[in-house]
Amino acid sequence: METETGNLSKKEAEAILNTLPVDLTFVDKDNVVRYFNKTDRRIFVRTMADVGRKMQLCHPEGSVNRVNQVLEAFKKGEEGVAEFWVQRDDHQIHIRFFPVRDKEGRYLGTLEVDQDITDLKKIEGEKRRLDWLTY
């Protein structure tokens, strides 16, 4: 796969996307799930049965109205991000939606990025050394 900033094989691109410490789900301009990454600790379960389904069917019924409003605002170009955070058991989950556009600004779809930020919220000060390296 050739990009503006380099070249990756399909194998490398998939490995990179699956290595990221976030859940990714891409829905196309028609609100259909087209892709999700496969991380070791996925927050919101996705299966291959979700690919080809409407995004709204992958969210709790009580949030579908909000999902629709976000998607509509992205399609119209009114917003550039939608951010939520929720508690799930003892974990703080940060949920972000981003409109995906081509170089000409045409709406291609929406990227959902979910991340467990529980440990990130504990960070203070600086850490300049790795515990497992010998210096």
Image (cartoon, rainbow, N blue to C red):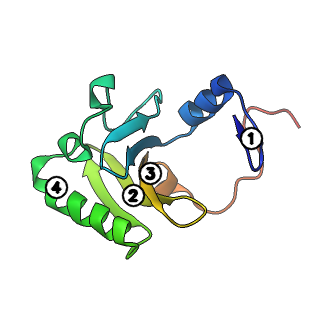
Which mark lies nearer to you, 1 or 2?
A: 2
The quarter holding residue 75 reads bottom left
Q: What's the residue at 27%, 52% (across, down)?
A: 87
Q: Are marks 3 and 2 in contact (CB under 8 Å)?
A: no
Q: Position of residue 61 (x, y in %)?
A: 10, 48
| Residue 12 to residue 87: above or below | above
**Amino acid carrying mark 4 in the image:** Ser
Which residue was labeled with disc 3?
Answer: 117
Q: Which mark is residue 16?
A: none
Camera-nearest residue between 107 and 49: 107
How far apart marks 4 and 1 lie (CA) works out to 41 Å
Q: Earlier in the sequence, mark 4 or mark 1?
A: 4
Which residue was labeled with disc 4?
Answer: 63
Camera-nearest residue between 24 and 91: 24
How far apart marks 3 and 4 lie (CA) works out to 21 Å
Q: Position of residue 29 (x, y in %)?
A: 37, 52
Which residue was labeled with disc 1?
Answer: 130
**Amino acid carrying mark 3 in the image:** Ile
How far apart marks 3 and 1 lie (CA) works out to 20 Å
Q: Earlier in the sequence, mark 3 or mark 4?
A: 4
Camera-nearest residue between 73 and 98: 73
**Amino acid carrying mark 2 in the image:** Phe
Which residue was labeled with disc 2?
Answer: 97
Q: Earlier in the sequence, mark 3 or mark 1?
A: 3
Looking at the rendered image, the quarter that the C terminus falls into is top right
How far apart marks 3 and 2 lie (CA) works out to 16 Å
**Amino acid carrying mark 1 in the image:** Leu
